[in-house]
Amino acid sequence: MHLVVLDSIGEFLPLFRLLSRRWLRFIAGAIAQLTDNNTYRQKLLHVEKLTPMRQWSARQASRLKKSDYRQSYLGERRN
């Protein structure tokens, strides 16, 4: 397992462009639990928590695959 340590919030900001703020709050919480460093978690407490989702069962996943569910939110396939 690799742990990336960021020295300042400035190093954290480029991630903001790639991930939603909700995900960043989740990741900051994980960093805080693993390292006892609450710096990033404290800066993201104003961000709403991720919405929990139930994991699909094998049967649901099979049905979604057959109905090409993934393509419904990705749009046209680009090859």
Image (cartoon, rainbow, N blue to C red):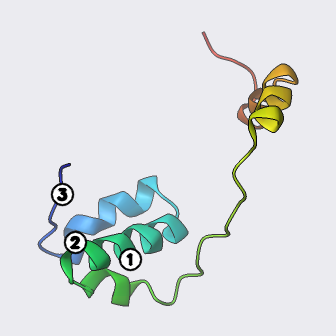
- Report helix, strand or loop for mark 1: helix
- The residue positioned 35% from the left and 59% from the top of the image is 15
Image location (x, y in percent) of residue 69: 81, 31
Residue position marked by numbered label 3 in the rendering: 3
Query: Furthest residue to the front?
Result: 58
Image location (x, y in percent) of residue 47: 53, 82
- Amino acid type at circle 1 is Gly
Residue position marked by numbered label 1 in the rendering: 29
Dot 2: within a 10 Å radius of its alpha carbon, few (fewer than 14), some, or many (20 or more) residues? few
- The residue positioned 27% from the left and 67% from the top of the image is 12
In the drawing, what numbered circle is on residue 62? none
Disc 3 from disc 1: Cα separation: 14 Å
Image height of 22 relative to 72, above or below: below
Counting residues from the start of the chain, the first of labels 2 and 3 encountered is 3
Disc 2 from disc 1: Cα separation: 18 Å
- Amino acid type at circle 2 is Gly
Image height of 48 relative to 79, above or below: below
Front of the two marks 2 and 1: 1
- Amino acid type at circle 3 is Leu
Image height of 33 relative to 78, above or below: below
